[in-house]
Image (cartoon, coloured by chain):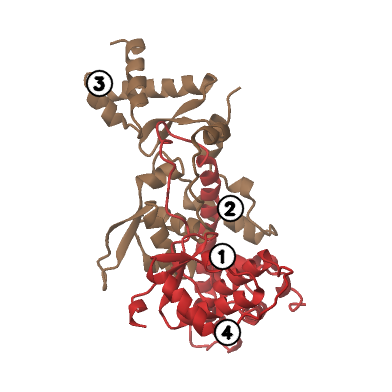
C-alpha cells in the first residue's frame, strides 16, 4: 500500500482508541507493513497535526500514540465538559514520586531515608491515584515491598516513556550550581528539562 | 546575628529536617561541601524551638536530625587522633551526601510540578465523559481537637450574636446536649458538623453544643472525619456507640 493509503488508516486507528496506541498494536493491524515505515508515518502525522492549526495534536505518551488537545484550549474544554481537574500533588507527593521514578524499584525505607520523613501517607495517596504500584519485594530481611511508577504516571506527566525523563545527573549539576553559587533558590527556568521545552512549543497553539 | 533570622522562616514549608537544613544552607549562602556546623546547628535548633513554641507538633525526625547535628559538632570539636590516616572522614560527609541527594530529587520534583501543571490542561481523546473523581490528596482522616476548634471559630465568625430579646435564659446543659447528639445519630448514619448547629442561635448554646461534641468524641462514641482539606466535617458513630 502507498503512504497516502496507510496514513488515513493509522489516523483512524488512533482516532477510535481512547488510550495511547503502541507501534506494536498498529503493526498488529497492518501486518504487511514494516514497523519502521509505520513509525515514520506516525512521525509524519505528528508533524502534520502540529503544523496545521488544529485543536488537537498527536503525541507519543506512555509508550503509544494518542490525540490530545492543545493545552491553551483547556478553558473551553472545561466549560463544555465541566471537567473537574484532579487535585494537584502536594510537595511531599511530588518529591516521593520523583524518588520512585528515578530509583525504582525502591522501598519505602529508601524513600524515607532520602526525604528524612515518614512516607506512609504519601505512598498511599500515590497508590490510590495509581501513579505508583507495588512491583515486588526486596529480598532482604523483612522483604519490604518495592514501588515503581505506572502507565498512569507517564500519562500524568505526558511522558512517552521513562527515558524521556531528564537524567538525575542534570538535576544534580543544576542543584550544585544553585547551592554553591549564591542563588537562593533553584531557578525554575533552568531546570526545565529539554523534552519539556519542545513540547511546550508544540502544545501551545500553532498560529 | 544568627538570632534575628529564624523569625522570617516560613515554618509550614518544611517537609522534613533535611528540607529545613537545605533551607538554612541556602539562606546563609553556605557552600554545601563546607558547612559551618556550629552556625547551622544553632539556627536549626532555633527553628525547631520556634516550631515548638508555636505549638506545632515537631515530628521526631526533626529531633533526630538535631541530635545528629550536635553529634557532628562535638566530633569536630574533638582533636582527631593522630593514629588514623589523614583522610579520616569528615563527620559531615554523610550529611552532605544526604543533602545533595535530597536536593536532586527536590529539583526533579519541581520539574515534575511544571509538567503536571501543563498536562492537567491537556485532554486525551474520549476522556472527558466522566468528571474524574480521583482520590483527593487528603484521605479521610480523623481530626484532632485543634481541627475542631478551628471549625468552631469559623462557625462563630459566620454567626455573629444576633440581637434578640432574650427573655428566658437557656438552661441546656452539656450533658443534655450530649444526649441530643447521640439521639440524633441513632436515626442516621452520620451528621454534618453544621447540622449540629443548624437550629442553634445563641453563642451560649453553640458553645454548650461544642463542649458536648468534644465530650462524646472524648468518650469514643463518635468520630469526626473530613473527606478533603476544605470539606465539611462529618460526625460518625464509632463501634462503641451502642454501648453507651
| Residue at screen point 37% across, 83% down | B244
Give the letter of the chain under mark 1: B
Hue of chain A? brown
Mark 3 Cα shell of 10 Å, populated few (<14), some (14-19), many (≥20): some
Residue ID at (41%, 40%): B130
Q: What's the distance in space between the residues labelled 2 and 3, CA to CA?
A: 45 Å
Q: Which chain is red?
A: B
Q: Position of residue B236 (x, y in %)?
A: 41, 69
Determine which residue is flagged by label 3: A30
Mark 4 vs mark 1: which is more N-terminal?
Answer: 4
Residue situated furthest front in the rendering: B167
Question: Do the residues marked 1 and 3 share a common chain?
Answer: no
Where does residue A93 sit, x and y in percent of width and height?
48, 58
Q: Is residue A83 visible?
A: yes
| Residue at which label 1 appears | B198
Are labels 4 and 3 on one chain?
Answer: no
Q: How many angstroms separate mark 1 from mark 2 (CA)?
A: 56 Å
Disc 2 target residue: A174
| Real-space Cα separation, disc 4 to disc 3, in angstroms | 68 Å
Amino acid at each position: 500500500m502507498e503512504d497516502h493509503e496507510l496514513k488515513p488508516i493509522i489516523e483512524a486507528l488512533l482516532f477510535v482508541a481512547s488510550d495511547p496506541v503502541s507501534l506494536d498494536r498498529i503493526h498488529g493491524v497492518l501486518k504487511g507493513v514494516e514497523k519502521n515505515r509505520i513509525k515514520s508515518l506516525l512521525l509524519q502525522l505528528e508533524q502534520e497535526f502540529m503544523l496545521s492549526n488544529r485543536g488537537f495534536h498527536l503525541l507519543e505518551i506512555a509508550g503509544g500514540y494518542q490525540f490530545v488537545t492543545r493545552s491553551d484550549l483547556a478553558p473551553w474544554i472545561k466549560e463544555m465538559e465541566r471537567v473537574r481537574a484532579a487535585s494537584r500533588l502536594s510537595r511531599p507527593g511530588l518529591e516521593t514520586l520523583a524518588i520512585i521514578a528515578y530509583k525504582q524499584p525502591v522501598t519505602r525505607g529508601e524513600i524515607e531515608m532520602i526525604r528524612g520523613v515518614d512516607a506512609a501517607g504519601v505512598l498511599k495517596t500515590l497508590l490510590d491515584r495509581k501513579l505508583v504500584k507495588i512491583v515486588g519485594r526486596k529480598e532482604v530481611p523483612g522483604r519490604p515491598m518495592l514501588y515503581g511508577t505506572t502507565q498512569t504516571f507517564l500519562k500524568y506527566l505526558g511522558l512517552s516513556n521513562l527515558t524521556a525523563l531528564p537524567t538525575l545527573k542534570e538535576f544534580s549539576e543544576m542543584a550544585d550550581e544553585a547551592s554553591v553559587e549564591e542563588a537562593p533558590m533553584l531557578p525554575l527556568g533552568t531546570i526545565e528539562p529539554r523534552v519539556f521545552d519542545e513540547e511546550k512549543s508544540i502544545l501551545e497553539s500553532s498560529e | 546575628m544568627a538570632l534575628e533570622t529564624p523569625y522570617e522562616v516560613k515554618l509550614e514549608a518544611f517537609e522534613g529536617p533535611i528540607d529545613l537544613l537545605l533551607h538554612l544552607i541556602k539562606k546563609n549562602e553556605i557552600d554545601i561541601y563546607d558547612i559551618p556546623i556550629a552556625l547551622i546547628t544553632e539556627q536549626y535548633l532555633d527553628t525547631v524551638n520556634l516550631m515548638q513554641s508555636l505549638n506545632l507538633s515537631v515530628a521526631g525526625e526533626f529531633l533526630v536530625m538535631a541530635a545528629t547535628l550536635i553529634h557532628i559538632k562535638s566530633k569536630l570539636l574533638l582533636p582527631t587522633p593522630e593514629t588514623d590516616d589523614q583522610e579520616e572522614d569528615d563527620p559531615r560527609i554523610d550529611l552532605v551526601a544526604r543533602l545533595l541527594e535530597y536536593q536532586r530529587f527536590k529539583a526533579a520534583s519541581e520539574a515534575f510540578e511544571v509538567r503536571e501543571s501543563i498536562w492537567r490542561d491537556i485532554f486525551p481523546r474520549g476522556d472527558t465523559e466522566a468528571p474524574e473523581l480521583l482520590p483527593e490528596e487528603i484521605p479521610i482522616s480523623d481530626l484532632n481537637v485543634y481541627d475542631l476548634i478551628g471549625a468552631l471559630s469559623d462557625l462563630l465568625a459566620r454567626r455573629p450574636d444576633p440581637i434578640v430579646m432574650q427573655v428566658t435564659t437557656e438552661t441546656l446543659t452539656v450533658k443534655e446536649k450530649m444526649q441530643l447528639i447521640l439521639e440524633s445519630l441513632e436515626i442516621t448514619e452520620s451528621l454534618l458538623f453544621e447540622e449540629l448547629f443548624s437550629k442553634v442561635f445563641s453563642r451560649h448554646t453553640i458553645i454548650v453544643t461544642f463542649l458536648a461534641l468534644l465530650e462524646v468524641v472524648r468518650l469514643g462514641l463518635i468520630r469526626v472525619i473530613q473527606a478533603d482539606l476544605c470539606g465539611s466535617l462529618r460526625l460518625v458513630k464509632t463501634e462503641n456507640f451502642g454501648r453507651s
